[in-house]
Image (tube, helix red, strand yellow):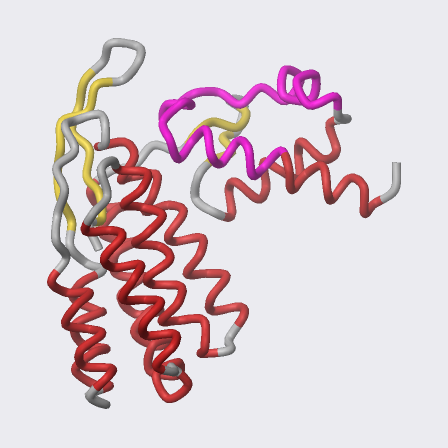
Amino acid sequence: MTMSTEDTIANRISRILAERIITGALEPGSKLRQDHIAEEFGASHVPVREAFRRLEAQGLAVSEARRGVRVASFSLAEVQEVALMRSVLEGLALRYAAPHLTSFLLDQADAAAQAGDAATNIREWDEANRRFHKLLLSPCSMPRLLAEIDDLHAAGSRFLFATSRAAWAPRVDADHKAILDDLRKGRIDQAVITLERHVKRIGQQPIHYASGQTGAAFALEG
């Protein structure tokens, strides 16, 4: 098996495991068993270990001495850390992206915002919300910065899906409209300030795990 083949397999394994973690199919603290995962994907341990490293880099898994790799737990402090990092990095990205935002891109972002407002479930809302942010930030042309923001969004989606087991209620996001309005009128500083505040919104919901355990879950709402 070539290195490029192993990398492709590691990408697939990490992507699928990330989806399971983000959606709550794999609960916090669950052990990621290398042998079982290698067997499931018909792979050797090499790409599985690489997939685990990628999950750790995204904050979705942790490696513990003598305990192996487990799904990362999350607390209010961790959610606050992600929120703060998103605030700083997305503010930076928007400041550099704003001069390159065309009317077409702003219209697309507006459509994404409207799709989020009309979402009937948490998955629809999350996809629309992430699309809104990506459309506004991508023109900054900073691939490393955008990759880091993508990882933070993945972590944020995980927090969000954890709370989605409670009832979902449609919501209208006034911040999205305000950000778009400021960008259209050239008020870049105000748009950045609103975005930085927006992504630090944290909500709390009760959570009921498949195991029957209950707890409190915190999630980013921006």
Name the one closer to the observer, 36 or 107: 107
Q: Position of residue 32 (x, y in %)?
A: 53, 23
- Residue at 34% x, 43% y: name it: 157
- Residue at 31% x, 62% y: name it: 86
- Residue at 12% x, 53% y: name it: 172
Q: Which residues are magenta?
A: 13-42
Q: Position of residue 45 (x, y in %)?
A: 73, 27
- Residue at 16% x, 27% y: name it: 166
Name the one closer to the observer, 29 or 183: 183
Residue 193 visible in the shown view = yes
Please say if 216 is above or below 149: above
Please say if 48 is above or below 40: below
Please say if 173 is above or below 168: below
Q: Give the number of callouts.
A: 0
Q: Quadrant of the C terminus?
A: bottom left
Q: Is residue 63 left or right of residue 179?
A: right
Q: Is residue 29 magenta?
A: yes
Q: Position of residue 167 (x, y in %)?
A: 14, 28
Q: Quadrant of residue 83?
A: bottom left
Residue 85 visible in the shown view = no
Dominant secondary structure, magenta: helix
Please say if 29 is above or below 3: above
Q: Is residue 109 magenta?
A: no
Name the one closer to the observer, 194 or 31: 194
Q: Quadrant of the N terminus?
A: top right
Q: Is residue 203 left or right of residue 137?
A: left
Q: Is residue 71 left or right of residue 17?
A: left
Which residue is farthest top?
A: 212
Q: Position of residue 189 (x, y in %)?
A: 21, 85
